[in-house]
Image (cartoon, coloured by chain):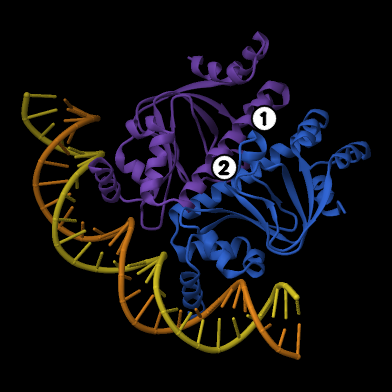
Chain colours: A purple, B blue, C orange, D yellow
Amino acid sequence: MYDNYFRQLTAKMPLTDDERALIQSFLSVKKIRRKQYLLQEGDVCKVVAFVEKGALRSYTVDNEGKEHVLQFALEGWFISDLYSFLTGEVSVYTIEAIDDSELVLINQPAHEELLKRSPSYQAYMLQLITGAYIALQRRVTSTISLSPEERYRDLVALYPNIVQRVPQHMIASYLGLTPETLSRIRRRLADE
Amino acid sequence: MYDNYFRQLTAKMPLTDDERALIQSFLSVKKIRRKQYLLQEGDVCKVVAFVEKGALRSYTVDNEGKEHVLQFALEGWFISDLYSFLTGEVSVYTIEAIDDSELVLINQPAHEELLKRSPSYQAYMLQLITGAYIALQRRVTSTISLSPEERYRDLVALYPNIVQRVPQHMIASYLGLTPETLSRIRRRLADE
DNA sequence: GCTTTCCATTGATCTGAATCAAGAAAAGTC
DNA sequence: GACTTTTCTTGATTCAGATCAATGGAAAGC
């Protein structure tokens, strides 16, 4: 159940059996079906989710009712609204399963407790947030300095598995394009 | 010299005199003149800078030679390319002083050492990166879900001091607009 | 204080992506 | 396996913001 989670964790952070048991005692498992929500806009984000299996995305809805994808999370990734999770403020994001998925969850009190009790967990969290920060910064850089076509190529180069796995209109939304525009970009690239 | 820095730090993290002395021994001070660089594209980012006085910005230059502002830092803010600083990879960003400025710097080895030796510093760094992450996430959200006019209003509401202090064409660049477009938006808003 | 560079504004025009519309194909559901 | 829903594609049209161009004014630098 926690296989991928601990594979990931121990790869970065060797753990004693005791520490592993301690951490595991604070985790829980959840299965979630395609199109179900892990978080809804207006709620406080209660958990950080590790994707054991499946795929999820987070998105905002603007005034005109349009969705804008913030992040995808495939197997081995984390997803959450860290802002809401850490501050307790309500979230402007929705997190939804793209496919039937299996998640490993940790809630806020458990997270607090583990930070205090496990130095490994603490160090891991610092790495996690740093990684999230770096991924976001790359995204911002791409958004502000590349053309739509370049942004798409960048995404394909960096996360080919996302492009293969996720419906195209969600990729378009992630890139800040309409599905029509992305379709035309793909044709242009294929024609060359 | 380190007044603002420690005011900021102790506000979040009570320090013993010893700890303060330890941290201070790892810091250095730098004055930098308007238009001088703290970091140039292609170099590794060696420091995290706290702005005691003045104002800086970071930006990327795209294929066509256009600048895109990633971040502003006024008094009391930090600026760096954390990605480059932490990984040692070269940076795609330039960090430049907008006005003559005074900075408190910490370099990578000092940062490593302090992480090991000062739990307060460690906890502070976690807060810092978390804060940076949250600020970036807000920026992404604004970029993907708001119109240019809404983005500008958001910026004015959130950081009025930036808008007052920084040349308008840099604000435009930060918002992903041309100076002309921002000028027209401002007129529209003033006319109403 | 004078010169030069930089900066904000306004108008005219252009353009790339959005929108609108419709049909085909694929996937999901019962 | 038939039906429904979702997804992708293609074409025609529109539109918001970029680009091009020019001016007046402010700040920087000597």
Instruction: Residue B83: tell me if it is visible.
Output: yes
Quarter in which the C terminus of chain A is drawn = top left
Q: Nearer the viewer, residue B71 or A83?
A: B71
Amino acid beneath label 1: Glu
Tell me residue B135's x, y (percent): 60, 49
Marked residue chain, label 1: A
Tell me residue B152's x, y (percent): 52, 65
Q: Which residue is label 2 attached to?
A: A84
Q: Which residue is label 1 attached to?
A: A112
Amino acid beneath label 2: Ser
Q: Nearer the viewer, residue B94 or A183?
A: B94
User: For numbered disc 1, what is the local secondary structure?
Assistant: helix
Residue A83 drawn above or below residue A128 = below
Q: Residues within 10 Å of mark 2 (few under 14, many from 20)?
A: some
Marked residue chain, label 2: A
Q: Nearer the viewer, residue B155 or A44?
A: B155
Instruction: Residue A92: tell me if it is visible.
Output: no
On screen, residue A168 versus residue B4, left or right, reads: left
Tell me residue A56's x, y (percent): 41, 33
Q: Measure the alpha-carbon separation of dots 1 and 2.
A: 15 Å
